[in-house]
Amino acid sequence: MTNYTLLYLFPFFLLIQQQRCLQLPSALDDGFVGINGVQLTLNGAPFYANGFNAYWLMDVASNPFQRSKVTSAFQEAVSSSLMIARTWAFSDGGSNALQSSPGVYNEKMFQGLDFVISEGGKFGVKLILSLVNNFNDYGGKSQYVQWAKERGEQMQNEDSFFTNPMVKRFYKNHIKTVLTRKNTITGVVYKDDPTIMAWELMNEPRCSSDASGVTIQNWISEMACYLKSIDGNHLLEVGLEGFYGASSSQKNPNNSPHGTDFITNNQIPSVDFATVHSYPDQWLSNRNHFGQLDFLQQWIYDHIEDAQEVLQKPVIFAEFGTSDYNVSQKNELYNVVYSSIYRSARIGGVAAGGLFWQQLVQGMDSYKDGYEVILTEPSSTVRLIAQQSKRLSVTPRRFLSKKKT
Ligand SMILES: *[C@@H]1O[C@H](CO)[C@@H](O)[C@H](O)[C@H]1NC(C)=O
């Protein structure tokens, strides 16, 4: 912690438990993705855009010999008119860590992230940066809990991540360190960089040890306020998969609750837009392809309805995909997601875009997980992706008369 930190913390620390929190005024600069009612905006117009996940960007960019793959990823994305990339701004403990132990950062990895943001800016791709993982990959909440244990804290389980004061300090320090990082390539502090579209608190937060949802709700409120006290420029989302709480858990795959609630979690005022992930092949492996598609259709419909009518906030389908190698089945799944988004977007609705999981480029065989799409390998799926980009990119023109500025 530097003295500089106190400048941020002091006026705000009394407020952090409250749901409403003091926020810095947003910059009026063009180029930041903003929000107007149920729509995202960019440069004064509604922003509907197609996008992709590439969690590996920082990791690969940290190796100067591999860095060109990051450039290729953005270049190929732009050729398919993909405008949004979601990626990890975390890697906690273990080999190639960004944060090797609490508050200790690896400059080589940070320069990798600098490169990712710099290249995103060059190609005009907006970034969603996630700040920690619910799961063990790249450290995650279990690594934070482990760090606290090593310092003598009593921890019940991994979900102590959400409540233990030492862990919360570690995590807040990570938020602050990333947001106040000055990019060594562009010279722009991350919190002032319009290439960044939004911060994501956590990849797929779940808290199965507290099905009431209170634990997660408090954690989101506190962390969202903390983040907004540092950065008034950027949007914030939680990283939720979209599971409903106990009262609506019949809408969840297999009716299972996960300690989160799509409605109340996203109603927290400093959460700007909602997110949904969709993996019917993993969630409903007991059903056949068509059973999975039926679920997916309903899952997406429910979330668009709830975002439109209840939350009145934009929603991004921040991960979807299938490991199904049958191309026509894969395309059917993409079609369900893309058509549902477009039906909402074309009338100026809440569905702002979809990010498929995951984009790879040539020469990344070790990253293949069955879900990958390589945009330079011609396929009907790649054509579908480009079509969706096109129809979403003309959507704002329909609403220009409604624009605010
Ligand atoms: C792929 O899926 C389609 C539609 O579900 C099916 O008709 C076709 O036989 C499958 N192809 C292969 C190679 O399994």
Image (cartoon, rainbow, N blue to C red):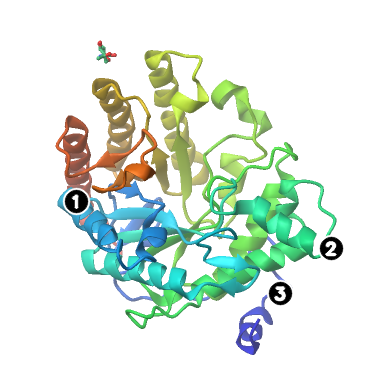
Q: Secondary structure under badge 3? A: loop
**Residue highlighted by disc 3:** 13
Of the 4 image quadrants, the one containing the C terminus is bottom left
| Disc with the residue nearer the chain's start (1 vs 3) | 3
In this figure, which residue is indicated by the disc labeled 2?
A: 152
Residue lying at 56% horizontally and 40% vertically, measured from the top left = 262
**Amino acid type assigned to the residue bearing label 3 in the image:** Phe
Q: Name which quarter of the figure residue 298 lies in.
A: top left
Mark closer to the chain start, 2 or 1: 1
Q: Is residue 383 left or right of residue 206?
A: left
Q: Which residue occupies 42% across, 48% down?
A: 314
Q: Percent x, y for residue 342? A: 27, 37
Q: Amino acid at mark 1?
A: Ser
Q: CA distance from mark 1 to mark 3?
A: 42 Å
**Left or right, 74 with reference to 185:** left
The kind of residue on which mark 2 rests is Gly
Q: Residue at x 22, y 33 (%)?
A: 381
- Count numbered badges in the picture: 3
For residue 81, the mark is 1
Residue 22 placement (x, y as % from top left): 60, 71
